[in-house]
Amino acid sequence: MDNQNAQMKAPYPGTHLPTQNPPEYPPAGFPGPPGYTGYPAPQAGYPGAGPVSFPGQQQPVFHQPGAPAGIPWMPAPPPPANCPPGLAYLTQVDQLLIHQQIELLEVLTGFETNNKYEIKNSLGQRIYFAAEDTDCCTRNCCGPSRPFTMRIIDNMGQEVITLERPLRCTSCCFPCCLQEIEIQAPPGIPVGYVTQTWHPCLPKFTIQNERREDVLKITGPCVVCSCCADIDFEIKSLDDKHVVGKISKQWSGLVREMFTDVDNFGIQFPLDLDVKMKAVMLGACFLIDFMFFEMTRGEQRTGMW
């Protein structure tokens, strides 16, 4: 009873349990796709991945440059078989929260800066830190349509995921050169792709594995805007019969929505889904953010893509 009372008084229940009783994550909010049995059998190592560092080998980076202090990092779990370096964190979560940081220069002047994001678990512990890497001319000339490289680092300061978005057409009237993003984990080793599927009314995407084989689909609403409510993009099986997760653009308040392009997202997926597919869904979230919600002040969110 004393332990229970102490836990209830903690600022974030479940985050201050004794080390011998680690917090248990809730069961997955969505079942896996039909026929999915969890992680595939162990395969050969990843060429070019280089040495992998784990806590205990070097001092962790508790505060990334530009990130707010005081947010705890999620402890690194032991990596399972067939897991790319740095993705072991994803084996223990069925939900990710992505919070974009407010850039004061961008708010005051409208001058587009590199986007930065915190990626957290459901307990509020930071898992990764993501930073856009594009030049000034590309950001301010191409706007939301710009190609970008997104570098995602872990608590050791190591880049574990790289997202590459090429420059593509943004009009729904042309079913060619549609949007795409490549997910690499570790950098240089593709683990999946997210490609836009042409549709005259709905935002649709296909999730592919490293061999360019279709695995899942993403379908968004016809009107990609809402007041005081979340906007959900459902993750479905290829036959559209099963919903296995969703990417939600979360309502962040009237002031933020009107005067900034800072957005918050949530991703839900099965707990036992392959970590590579979880990383691909993370890439899909960033692509959706840039396509539909990366607007500067005064622009209307019309839902065109």
Image (cartoon, rainbow, N blue to C red):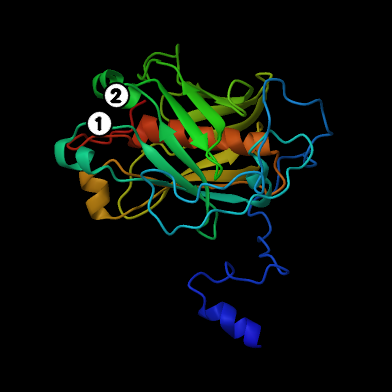
Secondary element under disc 1, as helix, strand or loop, is loop
Q: Quadrant of the C terminus?
A: top left
Q: Are marks 1 and 2 in contact (CB under 8 Å)?
A: yes
Task: Answer with the quarter of the image where residue 194 lies.
Answer: top right
User: Residue placed at 25% from the left, 54% from the top?
Assistant: 254
Residue 240 visible in the current orientation: no
Residue shown at 61% from the left, 44% from the top: 58
Q: Is residue 289 left or right of residue 238?
A: left
Q: Residues within 10 Å of mark 1 (few under 14, many from 20)?
A: many
Estimate how packed mark 2 is, as few (under 14), some (14 to 19) or many (20 or more) residues with alpha carbons within 10 Å: many
Residue drawn at x 42%, y 35% as measured from the top left: 131
Q: Which mark is residue 139?
A: 2
Res 183 seen here: yes
The quadrant of the image that shows the N terminus is: bottom right
Residue ID for mark 1: 112
Depth order, front residue of 235/55: 55
x and y percentages locating residue 124 in the rendered image: 50, 58
Q: Classify 2 as above or below 265.
A: below
Which secondary structure, mark 2?
helix
Residue 29: which disc?
none
